[in-house]
Amino acid sequence: MINFDIQEKKRFSFKVKNNIHYTTLSEINYIEGKSYLTTVYFSKNNEIKHCIYSNNLKNFEKKLVNYGFQRINKNIIVNLSKIKVVCSKNRNIILECGNVFIASVRRFKKFKNLLGNPL
């Protein structure tokens, strides 16, 4: 079982121009990687914001896997606490913010095992 309470306390920092901003892990919705650029999408004050990093997705995956984040395909890491619906038939994962992602076959099996069986 994943303890999401730790996300409220754990902080994530990002640099924008000459300033360093902080957010909690619980505010991160998902992370998208394209080549060596990674975009972190998060909710702050009921707004969806994003920051772009010149770092690959694998580095984010290594840092966040123990905090309730899971890679679902080649380009996307989701915050498991932000999942609204999982559709097994077509491997769709719908987040609370409305984004829909398709998990890869291989990663979806691991993802379902991580989430466990529904009630």
Image: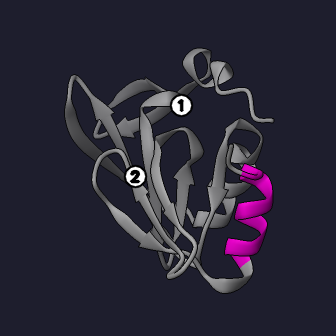
Relative image position of residue 25 (x, y in whole percent): 53, 31
Residue reaching furthest to the front: 119
* Pointer 1 or 2: first along the chain: 1
Q: Is residue 35 left or right of residue 45?
A: right
Q: Are marks 1 and 2 in contact (CB under 8 Å)?
A: no
Camera-side residue of 39 and 86: 86
How far apart marks 1 and 2 lie (CA) works out to 15 Å
User: Image height check: is 16 above or below 25?
Assistant: below
Instruction: Give the percent coordinates (x, y) of residue 75.
Output: 51, 74
Q: Which residue is mark 1?
A: 25
- Residue 68, by quadrant, is top right
Is residue 9 within the magenta segment?
A: no
Based on the picture, tell me whether residue 115 belongs to the magenta stretch: yes
Res 22 visible? yes
The disc at residue 95 is 2
When the figure is inspected, residue 1 is found, relative to residue 53, above or below; the finding is above
Along the line of sight, which residue is nearer the eye, 68 or 109?
109
Q: Position of residue 113 (x, y in %)?
A: 80, 60
Q: Residues within 10 Å of mark 1 (few under 14, many from 20)?
A: many
Mark 2 Cα within 10 Å, few/some/many (few <14, many 20+)? many
Disc 1 residue type?
Answer: Leu
> Residue at position x 70%, y 36% from top?
67
77 or 18: nearer the viewer = 77
Q: Which residues lie in the magenta part?
A: 107-117
Q: Quadrant of residue 105?
A: bottom right
